[in-house]
Image: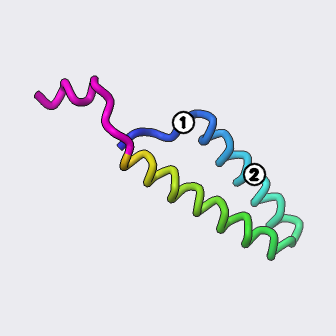
């Protein structure tokens, strides 16, 4: 499976830092919504990577 892009990795890190801040300041409902968003983004990026066609380099290694 392909790796997540650098931009998406930084976005996920930033969202998780905001999540930790929300938890630390007792904004529990906002933290729950943000956690749901982070989990959904993670699942979508995983599915996109799983269904993306393989690159030609990976294809040539199989033969």
The percent coordinates of residue 52 (x first, y second) are 38, 42
Q: Which mark is residue 22?
A: none
| Residue 42 image point, x, y percent | 55, 55
Q: Does the stretch in magenta take in 58?
A: yes
> Is 38 inside the magenta-drawn segment?
no
Q: Quadrant of the C terminus?
A: top left
Element on which disc 1 rests: loop
Residue occupying the point 65% across, 68% down: 36
Indicate the quadrant containing the N terminus: top left, top right, bottom left or bottom right. top left
Q: Is residue 52 above or below residue 34?
A: above
Stretch in magenta: 52-63
Kind of element beneath mark 2: helix
| Residue displayed at 50% across by 41% down | 4
Residue 6 rendering spot, x and y as whole percentages = 58, 33
Vertical placement of residue 7 versus 41, above or below? above
For label 2, the residue is 17
In percent of width and height, residue 29 lies at 80, 76
Residue 56 against residue 13 in the figure, above or below: above
Q: Is residue 37 left or right of residue 24?
A: left
Residue that label 1 marks: 5
Q: Nearer the viewer, mark 1 or mark 2?
A: 1
Residue at the image position 89 percent from the left and 66 percent from the top:
25
Classify residue 62 by image quadrant. Answer: top left
């Amino acid at each position: 499976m392909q790796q997540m892009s650098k931009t998406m990795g930084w976005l996920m890190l930033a969202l998780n830092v905001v999540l930790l801040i929300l938890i630390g300041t007792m904004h529990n409902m906002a933290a729950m919504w943000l956690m749901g968003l982070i989990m959904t983004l993670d699942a979508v990026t995983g599915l996109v990577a799983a269904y993306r066609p393989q690159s030609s380099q990976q294809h040539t290694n199989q033969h």
